[in-house]
Image (cartoon, helix red, strand yellow):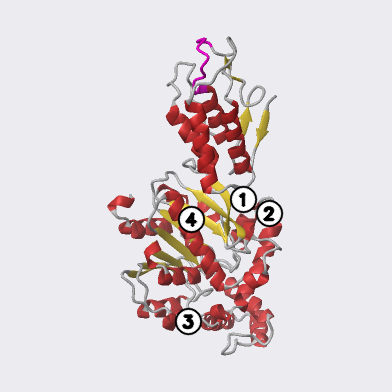
Amino acid sequence: MREILTSGSVGVRLDLPGSGLAGRIGNETHRQTPPAAELCVIVLLLNKLGGNVLSKKLKLLLSFFGLLVLCFPHSTEAGDGDVNGSGNTDLSDVVITLQVCAGLNPTASTQGGEKIGLKDAIFALQVVAGLRILPGNPSLENITLGGIEQWILIQSNGFSKPILLVLHGGPGFAMMPLFHEKNRELEDHFIVVNWDQRGAGRSYSPNIPKESMTLAQLLSDAHELTGYLKDRFDREKIFIVGHSFGTILGIFLVRSYPDDYLAFGSVGQVVDVIENEQLSYDFALSQAVADNNASAITELEQTGRPDEQGEYADDSGYEITMKWVSHYGGEMYGKTDSEEIEEAILNSEVYANHQEELINGWTFSQALFDDENVWQLDFRTSVAKVDVPVYFFTGRHDYDTPFKLVEQYYEVLNAPTKEIIWFENSAHFPFYEEAENFNKMIIAKFLNHISSNQN
């Protein structure tokens, strides 16, 4: 029997030759695997395919037990695959099975290749257990944060590198595959972790209590995730990059937990939500007047400028303002909308069978704007000092989160290191609009903060 189990393009592949876990690989017959070792492998593999639901301690225990079984002699009936007649089983059959389960190329031990040993078994078991990720292979995983199942995507070409946690914007604008598509170079220097926040993308569920959609809860989730990543990869600190709404989380994280972070990269920094909305409106109307665009002028004037509370006479004003901000390149420089980004996300393999969740998450996550801690914030007065280096990666034409506010915040912010890095041909998405330059700047600025014992 030949069975293939897959869990999407980023999951584990099981290709079991013969009957059961033991059988024929190529033209070579391999000896019977110890039943207890089979059981460990099966449990670990099903856990990986089922969403990584086992705790880290249990996975370690199963891996350790599996290795113990492998290290002890295992009796077989005379002549039953034991070509040496010793009654003992070497590691070859088990390791090859584990390697195939893990998506590794089976080690050649019978075709003149290197001898299979305990090191091969340990590595393969770690991969199957979810305790090690293959460099270059994306790992899409669900974990529990704040009592809610949430999803992360881990990508890197080596796991001795520093961790870079990406906090998406929106709120609700999940974009797990986007950094891999446009910023793949970062994976040569970092363990890049994209996270679909509570209520967004793959982390959306209709069962999430709406009252849990608060800034305090997302900050708690983010800090819990930080601890998880530090523990999993044995790091003292990590880097974070926040985009748009994610910069709110980023500033509060480095303010509250400076010992957890090496540096913060802010892309499209939110400074003051109310003034942000007012400046976006002013930009859209001024551009419409300069363009003599009667349709835009009529819509915007009928909508009216948001008041001192950042509110329009009608809630449709937010959508109308953003439509014209985008039309005049305030979201993507030189373009009239950002649909290409949305399409890239919607059509990615990560969300291929989860488009409804992605779209529902966009709407559901707007509940965060009901939190006064979001709507009333002004970082120029509330967080004027942090003890972590801060880099503002800022689009010169950004009117989604107007760059003028970023400049004002930069002037008052007290940080060990601070810098504005301008992207002259970008608006709100410099990591997408000028990906090569963005990657270069992130690498150059962040790696300066790596001490010798973290390289």
- Is residue 221 within the magenta segment? no
| Circles 2 and 4 in contact, beta carbons < 8 Å | no
Where residue 374 sits, quadrant-wise, is bottom right
Amino acid marked by disc 4: Tyr
Task: Please tell me which of labels 2 and 4 falls first in the chain.
Answer: 4
Front position among marks 2 and 4: 4
Where residue 322 sits, quadrant-wise, is bottom right
Amino acid marked by disc 3: Asp
Density class for disc 3 (Cα within 10 Å; few <14, some 14-19, many ≥20) is: some
| Vertical placement of residue 130 versus 297, above or below | above
Query: Which residue occupies the extreme left position in the image?
Result: 452
Q: Which of 438 and 40 is in front in this view?
A: 40
Which residue is labeled 2 in the image? Answer: 354
Residue 31 in percent (x, y) is at 57, 18
| Vertical placement of residue 208 versus 436, above or below | below
In the picture, measured across the screen, residue 392 lies left or right of residue 176, that is left
Instruction: Read off the magenta span.
Output: 83-92
Tell me the SS state at disc 4.
helix
Which residue is labeled 3 in the image? Answer: 378
Separation of marks 2 and 4 at Cα, in angstroms: 25 Å
